[in-house]
Image (spheres, coloured by chain):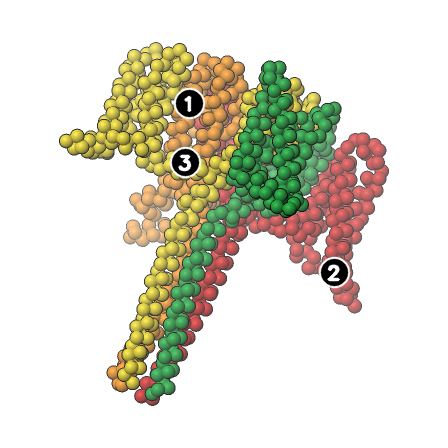
Chain colours: A green, B yellow, C orange, D red
Amino acid sequence: MITDHRASVREFVERPGFQQAIIAVIMLNAVTLGLETSQSMVAGIGGLLHVIDRTVVVIFVAELALRLYGYGWRFFRDPWNLFDFAIVGIALLPVTGEFAVLRALRILRALRLISVVPSMRRVVGGLLAAMPGMASIAALLSLILYVAAVIGTKLFWQIAPEHFGTLARTLFTLFQTMTGEGWPDVARAVMAEAPLAWIFFVVYILVSSFMVLNLFIAVVVSAMEGQVMAETRAEEAAHAAEEQVANRQILAEVQALRAELADLKARV
Amino acid sequence: MITDHRASVREFVERPGFQQAIIAVIMLNAVTLGLETSQSMVAGIGGLLHVIDRTVVVIFVAELALRLYGYGWRFFRDPWNLFDFAIVGIALLPVTGEFAVLRALRILRALRLISVVPSMRRVVGGLLAAMPGMASIAALLSLILYVAAVIGTKLFWQIAPEHFGTLARTLFTLFQTMTGEGWPDVARAVMAEAPLAWIFFVVYILVSSFMVLNLFIAVVVSAMEGQVMAETRAEEAAHAAEEQVANRQILAEVQALRAELADLKARV
Amino acid sequence: MITDHRASVREFVERPGFQQAIIAVIMLNAVTLGLETSQSMVAGIGGLLHVIDRTVVVIFVAELALRLYGYGWRFFRDPWNLFDFAIVGIALLPVTGEFAVLRALRILRALRLISVVPSMRRVVGGLLAAMPGMASIAALLSLILYVAAVIGTKLFWQIAPEHFGTLARTLFTLFQTMTGEGWPDVARAVMAEAPLAWIFFVVYILVSSFMVLNLFIAVVVSAMEGQVMAETRAEEAAHAAEEQVANRQILAEVQALRAELADLKARV
Amino acid sequence: MITDHRASVREFVERPGFQQAIIAVIMLNAVTLGLETSQSMVAGIGGLLHVIDRTVVVIFVAELALRLYGYGWRFFRDPWNLFDFAIVGIALLPVTGEFAVLRALRILRALRLISVVPSMRRVVGGLLAAMPGMASIAALLSLILYVAAVIGTKLFWQIAPEHFGTLARTLFTLFQTMTGEGWPDVARAVMAEAPLAWIFFVVYILVSSFMVLNLFIAVVVSAMEGQVMAETRAEEAAHAAEEQVANRQILAEVQALRAELADLKARV
């Protein structure tokens, strides 16, 4: 009986209508949370926005409960369900005191669109598939960032304390340099006292750009591999299969011929 | 009779000479509109520039009328014709009061070069063909921009109202950050009061760069697919076809042989 | 007799030793012209640098004269020779008064390294080969730059005359924006008076980035086409040729078989 | 006997346990060197950090000595061993007076992770493999940078001495321009006095971007060549081999048939 209930719950939550209703709720919530950023909106219709927000949370919790009941433990096997679970969970945490920042993170619920809309799910799936190929280069890049940060802090902490005063500050400065933003100002400030500091900046920029380039290439190659070459190979495999059929046909024909010849020979 | 008229009008507007005359008119208009940006030119030959501008509009309207007459309703099936229609339409709108900005948009007529010159038409056609492949990632990027903007406004609107004061302002700041321009100044201003704000900036930059990279890859893959691989596959398909012909020839030969052998067997 | 002379001159200028001597002279000149940028060097050994510079010009002229004599009119058929000719020609122009800037361009002689060193010649040849594929997109990008400049000047010349005052100034501002540099400062200055100006900037940045991206892709595709795919296709063509040989062999064998069978039939 | 000793030493240093211990030591040292950048840490546990640092150096020297003993001269044939040797060598140099900067370079020991962890070794190996393909374009880019620096210094040293005062300063300014950072400020400063200076900046930016793009393409093409196409070709080669087997089989069958027919003919 329970299994029947569960099956009918599953059938209900997988209906297109149900999915579309959830998408509508997510988008409504995204809009109300956007409106909440405006002071005049909060002063005017803040009560309404709050009611909608609470209602949406109730709907999300009810939806998750239905799916949990419907799928049982299997629910936790799909990583997208864990994603939904975590995002809805944030909404239920207390939002006072130190956790006030969580109020701002409520908008992360809008990311549930990704798990609900199949085409977005595919795109994100594709992006995540490129991750493993990037892992080694990302590790190398982190190592280089750390090494450069220790050197930079050691060398320049007295010259430019606002950029190189602590390891954390240097890491931020080097991340900024990696995005190619505002580094000449930093470099000139340091070079005013340590003229050879250009070596540090030029080497770091060349090495980190080369790493970022390779990170980038890893993604391009993985995308090429996945999309372009797959088609080419599929076509080629199809040609090869056709070819094989043709060859087998010829072979069978020739072998039949030989059998008949043997037969003829026996008669002669 | 009307059909004859129409056919001869079509034949007229498709003549290379007519097309070249239109190209010349477009370029002349582009130059006069450029000259109009100079105060001294307007003071000197403003009257002449105005006369040319009016004449060009008359020519464009006449050309469109001819093509409309020549092609009838079919005219509206070609999206490039709609493009021409819209651009010429702007020229006929009133340009006073609130619509004064439309005076500046008259130069959009120069874009008619794209619809008239076939090689440019092909390039733009190729660019538009890459669009559908970008749609899902662009939607995802917009979602992330919106989510980050709501979080940023909620967290920093009091700390840095000039960058995060309203949702619109934050969207502009985050677009600016995405182009990698001037973000460290913004980040340092915020971090002076909220030291952990670097998490927001670093996560946003990494995620949005990764998205832009993938948008970019979608275009590269689509171009590769379209240009490079198409040739490779065409060549391969040619080889496969040749191969098939050869195999059929062998098969036919072997089958003929078998028929003769059967014939021989019958005789023996 | 003259032909013999010419042939021996050609043989002389094509000797590796001669080429290496010219390379050495080019590099020496590059160094002396670099030293000339230092005031203290000019004060100390300015006379020597001047003597070397004059001597190098004499050597270049003599070398060109030899090659002109050796190859006759054919000399002008190789574009690299025209390049050498133009660069040496600059050295012979008067360098006083308005042409003083040409003194600075003498260092362009160092670019003769490209025409003399074969590996550099190949690289530049490869780069130039990618140009035609870029022409249409570059033209489109120029058109868009021009249209945006006219619109920008018309709309903002009063608000921000230092960036949008004249068409030339706006073109520079938009080129700067295209390189992604310092545009938020410009945009914020304009938006202070015209709040909707963000539309202009965002549309321009999106369109021009997309164009630059496609320019870039045109180069990548051309490089791929030239290098990677060429090898793959060559290999495939080799496989196809092998295959064809095998098929012909089988066909010949089968046909021979048929001939023998016909012979047998005739005997029976 | 010695050979036996050496073999057992080799066996010892190649044990996974030994390698993991070395990785742990490297990471411990990376952390302590990071902690040394903090003034409060040095004040608190500076003595401990120093002891760990000295101990780590002793361990590294001992490890190198073991490997040197184990492999003899062969040790120097692996470039990674030379890398380890150089990095440990830095640790043994005096760190007083002019060499104080070497104290900061001690963190380079953390890069030993690359030589010890096989996956990182492979990544760096792959990066280095792309280098030769970049050499010609990098040389060309350096040549262009030098030529532009000489021209820039000659033309602008009086106008903007802080950016173009000496050849070295101009090289730094042009490197900065190549990274697309802060060039409009430099350009506007120069253009205030030399209005045509925009030609220099625009030409330099276009040429250097095109070069950097091609440097980049060289790396992409090499990666494609290495990873994507290799698989495609391997698959194709496999198809071709299969095909060849099939063709040989058919040929053998047909030849056998012919032999039997000859036999039959002989009997008739």
Left or right position of B155 against C23: right
Gap in angstroms between the C-alphas marked 3 and 2: 62 Å
Figure check: A188 above or below D126: above
Report whether residue A163 is seen: no
Q: How far from the left and from the top, in percent, is residue B233?
A: 40, 52
> Which residue occupies the foreground of this view, A144 or B254?
B254
Badge 2 element = helix
Q: Are marks 3 and 2 in contact (CB under 8 Å)?
A: no
Left or right position of C13 against A49: left
Closer to the camera: disc 3 or disc 2?
3
Residue carrying label 3: B128
Kind of residue indicated by mark 1:
Ala
Figure check: B129 above or below B183: below
**Could you tell me which quadrant the C terminus of chain A lies in?**
bottom left
Crowding at dot 1, Cα within 10 Å, few <14 / some 14-19 / many 20+, comes out as: many
Q: How far from the left and from the top, in percent, is residue D179?
A: 55, 33
Badge 3 element = helix
Q: Quadrant of residue D195?
A: top left
> Which residue occupies the foreground of this view, C18 or D26?
D26
Report whether residue B1 is seen: yes
Residue carrying label 1: C149
Kind of residue indicated by mark 2:
Arg
Residue carrying label 2: D10
Kind of residue indicated by mark 3:
Leu
Gap in angstroms between the C-alphas marked 1 and 2: 70 Å
Q: Residue at x 41, y 61 (%)?
A: A242
Q: Are marks 1 and 2 on the same chain?
A: no
